Amino acid sequence: MTERKVFPYLVDSHAHLDFKQFDRDREQVLHRARDIGVKLILNIGFDLQSSRESVKLAEKYSFIYAVVGIHPHDAAKVPADYLLELEKLTRHPRVVALGEMGLDFYRDRSPRTVQRKVFREQLRLAKRVNLPVVIHDRDAHQEIMEIMEEEGLPEKGGVMHCFSGDLGLARQALKMGLYISIAGPVTYSRNERLCQVAAWVPADKLLVETDSPFLTPVPLRGKRNEPCNVAFTAEKIAELRGVPPEEIGRLCLENTKNLFSIT
């Protein structure tokens, strides 16, 4: 078994623990996360049903909070009243953000016109309910930024989840008041661009995540990801920034709480 460093403080700011991949051992997964030092997990919705499941997890576990929203893959499947349903979910005290929302021009599982429409509608809802946003961006960097500039962001800002752009995009995001979240790909070989971003992001704008069950970091790449593996990503970020791993754990936990207004 691969050893993970135990942290006094650690956070997974983006996971999908409601997915079927965790149905057989969800409790054990959560125990492993707690044993490694994870104090807080955000479970992220991708459609209405997964958003409801995220809320249920947050009700059951005191260290889990929910984010509700429509992923671009599912934009074409939303019912006519989806915004009303999302708004109802945002009133739950365990819901701390809207997302993940955005554009995915890599897989194009929903038509791009529909992706854009649903993204814009969710941004407007986030401003109305004053919750931060969790942004999904794959192969759509400049259009994502243009839409956010046109629509504006909620006062509380948001985060570019699983950041995959370069330093130029990171600078644009920061100017808009967004945080930058680094996931497992920072540990992959030949990912120099993401390593540069992870080393450069201002300390008060840095988050860390797993995107479980996806994007498992080295040395477990190819296996199902889970929140305890955030330790490997935090260690890599610490190496790139020349600081102790414990500092990254503490910093990212503090930043996550600040962004999502978690006490």
Image (cartoon, rainbow, N blue to C red):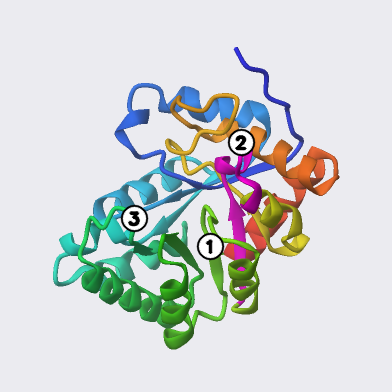
Distance from disc 1 to disc 3, alpha carbons, whole Å, reads 17 Å
Q: Position of residue 72 (x, y in %)?
A: 30, 61
> Could you tell me which residue is drawn at 60 percent across and 61 percent down?
166
* Residue 156 shows up from this direction: yes
Q: Could you say which disc has been placed on residue 189 in the image?
A: 2
Looking at the image, is mark 2 or mark 1 nearer the viewer?
Answer: 2
Ranked by sequence position, the earlier of labels 2 and 1 is 1
The residue positioned 66% from the left and 28% from the top of the image is 36
Pointer 2 and pointer 1: residues touching (CB < 8 Å)?
A: no
Label 2: which secondary element: loop
Q: Which residue is mark 3?
A: 106
Residue 183 is one of the magenta-drawn residues: yes
Q: Amino acid at mark 1?
A: Met
Which span is picked out in magenta?
A: 177-193
Q: Quadrant of residue 156?
A: bottom right
Q: Are marks 3 and 2 in contact (CB under 8 Å)?
A: no
x%, y% of residue 131?
Answer: 48, 72
